[in-house]
Image: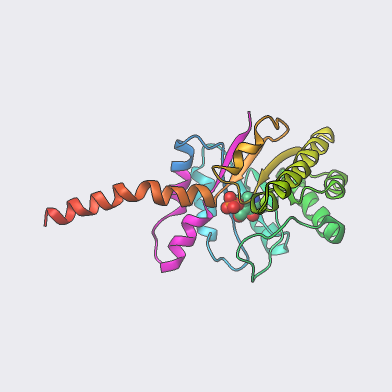
Amino acid sequence: MAGLAVNVDHVATLREARKIDIPDPVAAAVLAELGGADGVVVHLREDRRHIQERDVRIIRQIVKTKLILEMAATPEMITFALDVRPDMVTLVPERREELTTEGGLDLVIHRDTISDAVRTLQKEGIPVSIFIDPDIDQIKLAHRIDADYIEIHTGTFCDAKTPTRRNEEFERIRDAAKLASKLRLGVNAGHGLGYQTIKAFRGLSEIDEFSIGHSIIARAVLVGLERAVREMVSLIKEL
Ligand code: PXP
């Protein structure tokens, strides 16, 4: 059975919209674990637009399952990861102007940088996953540079507008997962997955863990809103 790692970045996005201290992604990490998550994911971006270093350090201390740190393979981030020691690092591409991670890392172009980062982190006992598109050549390269895991980018599948395109994209994911598993890479998957798109993965036993953030936080806002309003109404009635 596949696991679920919950990405709490967007709790921090909401906090940073006001630059105050609520809602706290640390509290979200605790609640995600209470809800049965197998891990907590945070992406510390170069521009610090949501998660801050303080969040990662506190979540590192309190997490009972595991902490997965998403990051770019920069010297600054590698130094930070070696200091904080997450249970796993997922290397992702990062562009300042993007709304969110827009695609997998291209190992054809960035092979040397990524390979060096993988080796440095592994040498210090931190397993490394590489976020890549469901592309056979990328999987083979991930294997060649000795990554522990790959995370298959599911965004194109989730964004597909027609059933035909969606089926094509899912087949790419399935082939990629099967090849990676055959090469003895751990296989995670994520980006854009929601309460409908997750259903397609039934029976795809090669996937070890899904990494899901936005759809869960978005749903939490809505399923929690009624109670939150009720509580404020009740406080106002007592005035
Ligand atoms: N996996 C990776 C590598 C990501 O960069 C992200 C977004 O931060 C996710 C998974 C989660 O994506 P979403 O928030 O769309 O569920």
Q: Which of 70 and 155 is in front in this view?
A: 155
The residue located at (40%, 50%) in the rendering is 222
Residue 152: where, in percent of width, then height?
Answer: 72, 46
| Residue 236 appears left or right of 211 | left
Residue 231: where, in percent of width, then height?
Answer: 24, 49
Q: Nearer the viewer, residue 46 or 224?
A: 224
Query: What's drawn in magenta, residue-wise?
Result: 1-30
The residue located at (50%, 34%) in the rendering is 36
Quadrant of the snapshot with the C terminus: bottom left
The residue located at (60%, 59%) in the rendering is 44
Q: Is residue 199 visible?
A: yes
User: In the picture, residue 197 is in which quadrant?
Assistant: top right
User: In the picture, residue 184 is in which quadrant?
Assistant: top right
Quadrant of the snapshot with the N terminus: top right
Magenta-colored stretch includes residue 13: yes
Residue 72: where, in percent of width, then height?
Answer: 70, 60
For the rendered model, the colour scheme is rainbow
Q: Which of 84 and 33 is in front in this view?
A: 33
Q: Can residue 149 be seen in this view?
A: no
| Residue 23 appears left or right of 149 | left
Magenta-colored stretch includes residue 83: no
Q: How many marks?
A: 0
Residue 96: where, in percent of width, then height?
Answer: 65, 70
Position of 13 relative to 150 (above/below): below
Q: Return the residue found at the far left.
A: 239
| Residue 64 appears left or right of 77 | left
